[in-house]
Image (cartoon, rainbow, N blue to C red):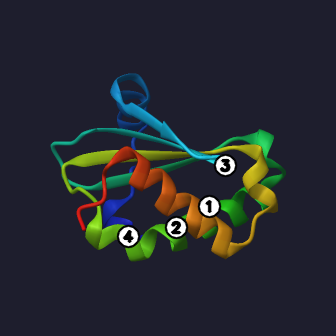
Amino acid sequence: MTKQIRLKRRAAFRYVFRKGDKSGAKDLTLLSARSREGLKIGLSVSKRVGNAVARNRVKRLLREAIRPLESVLNKDYMYVIVARPSIAELGFAEVCEQVKLVFTRAGKLTC
């Protein structure tokens, strides 16, 4: 995931949490809301996932799993991916499958 598309502002996260449509998979939840700024993606990994090392690992895995999907995502939305605690035990291939599944269920892939 490139730095240009990262969702950083707290107000933007709050907007997506309040107005966004939800879709889920076993270990992830995707929230999506209309965006004026183009494609933006944020990650939410709470302390329930684990200690700082585990949370940072999950965020790294999610960013790398999103990277190949950037070109086929609907550019008119902001997305927030919320990680559930069970994701900390998964490997990279399983995280990639979960990310693709959650975007497919939401209908946000433009391929």
What x and y, as percent, mark residue 80?
Answer: 45, 45
Which tag, 2 or 4, sits closer to the chain's start?
A: 2
Q: How many marks?
A: 4
Question: Are circles 2 and 4 on residues that touch, CB within 8 Å?
Answer: no
Q: Which residue is mark 2?
A: 63
Give residue 70's mark: none
Q: CA distance from mark 2 to mark 4?
A: 10 Å
Q: Quadrant of the C terminus?
A: bottom left
Q: Quadrant of residue 96?
A: bottom right
Q: Which residue is mark 3?
A: 27
Question: Are circles 1 and 2 on residues that touch, CB within 8 Å?
Answer: yes
Question: Are circles 3 and 2 on residues that touch, CB within 8 Å?
Answer: no
Q: CA distance from mark 1 to mark 3?
A: 13 Å
Give residue 69's mark: 4
Which tag, 4 or 3, sits closer to the chain's start?
A: 3
Q: In the rendered view, tell whether residue 96 sits above or below residue 16.
A: below
What x and y, as percent, mark residue 21?
Answer: 37, 31
Q: CA distance from mark 1 to mark 4?
A: 16 Å
Mark 1 residue element: helix
Q: CA distance from mark 4 to mark 3?
A: 18 Å
Residue placed at 52% from the left, 70% from the top? 65
| Horizontal arrangement in the rendering, residue 73 relative to residue 7 (left or right) | left
Question: Are circles 1 and 3 on residues that touch, CB within 8 Å?
Answer: no
Q: Which residue is mark 1?
A: 59
Q: Quadrant of the N terminus?
A: bottom left
Q: CA distance from mark 1 to mark 2?
A: 6 Å
Of residues 110 and 19, the one drawn nearer to the viewer in this rendering: 110
Mark 4 residue element: helix
Q: Quadrant of residue 73?
A: bottom left
Q: What kind of residue is marked 3? A: Asp
Q: What kind of residue is marked 2? A: Arg
